[in-house]
Amino acid sequence: MNDYRYTLEPYNGMKTRYHCPNCNKKGVFTKYVDIHTKEHLNDNVGKCSRLIKCGYHYTPKQYFDDNNLSFDTLINSKVIARVKPKPKTSFINVEVLNKSKTRSKPNFFIDFLANHWNKEVAFELLDKYHIGTSNYWNGSTVFWQVDVKGNVRSGKIMLYNASNGKRVKEPYNHINWVHKALKLDNFNLEQCYFGEHLLNEDTSKPVAIVKSEKTAVISSVYLPEFIWLACGSVNNLNESKTRALKGRNVVLFPDLKCFDLWNNKIPQLTSLATFRTSTLLKEKANQIEKEQGYDLADYLLKIK
């Protein structure tokens, strides 16, 4: 039987339950501890007990993946977590990206954009952000990650509802990666910010970062004074990706549920760029919107 190096900290009174970095509630967060040293892996690595209202669960594996660390699980508790020499980043041929930018196959996210604005705007966004179409699910979208050097890191495949623009999460969460769908062997994914290739267009323009690719695309129409990027998940705002922003002025637009989590990361990133966190959503949102974790797109889409 496999025994893992890290486990959720056993309950030993409220001193072992902490402030959740996502929903900001006290006494609901359980951290992962090293079973040998009894030390916490990281203050953000753990699970919130508010499964419905929060659902935050950042696992050791995700932490190691996000920080380019190796997590080896061995039998009989002989588990070693160590830093390995950084493997070479894998890339996907740009022709795969270009072929995915077809306009002849159904793409429900592009349909949503066309319904909200028009086809001309939708196709402009498709070209600008390298939005592709996948056959993995009928109507699914590919958000390609292209770095500042023009390398195609990979593409995130997701399925959206063409009517309301929401992601399809039932009966399961429809999300995958192109390199996995293509079954590319020994592929080493090192993510970059979605939209990072746009940094080359204007070196003086301020940068705005949101969580989701959808929000970045939509925000770029309403607020074109920024270069809009997306980090893809709440924990993907990190130092390794931010190196591409060296010397830039950056504004973070976190979802309502991760305001403090992102704001608290700024001291770790200020050596690379100048950061500030927008309080727009936090000041405008009502209690229901805060509980639902509204993001910027939820507000902008109400504007005609």
Image (spheres, rainbow, N blue to C red):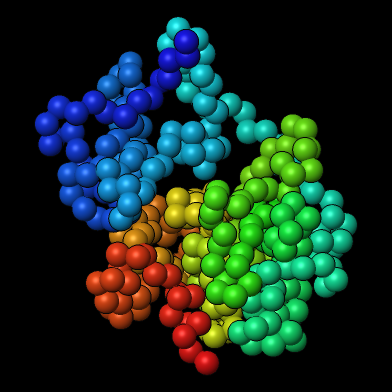
- Residue that lies at the very extreme toward the front in this rendered image: 171
Whether residue 123 can be seen here = yes
Q: Is residue 262 above or below residue 164?
A: above
Q: Which image quarter: residue 135?
A: bottom right
Q: Is residue 116 left or right of residue 51?
A: right
Residue 168: x %, y % from top left? 57, 59
Residue at 74% of width from left, 52% of height from top? 136
Residue at 13% of width from left, 35% of height from top? 15
How many labels sit on residues? 0
Q: Is residue 134 left or right of residue 217?
A: right
Q: Which image quarter: residue 185?
A: top right
Residue 71: x %, y % from top left? 52, 26
Residue at 61% of width from left, 84% of height from top? 116
Residue 260: x %, y % from top left? 30, 60
Whether residue 198 can be seen here = no
Residue at 73% of width from left, 68% of height from top? 107
Between residues 255 and 271, which one lies in front from this camera angle? Answer: 255
Between residues 282 and 291, which one lies in front from this camera angle? Answer: 291
- Residue that lies at the very extreme toward the top in this rendered image: 76
Q: Is residue 46 left or right of residue 201?
A: left
Residue 39: x %, y % from top left? 28, 26
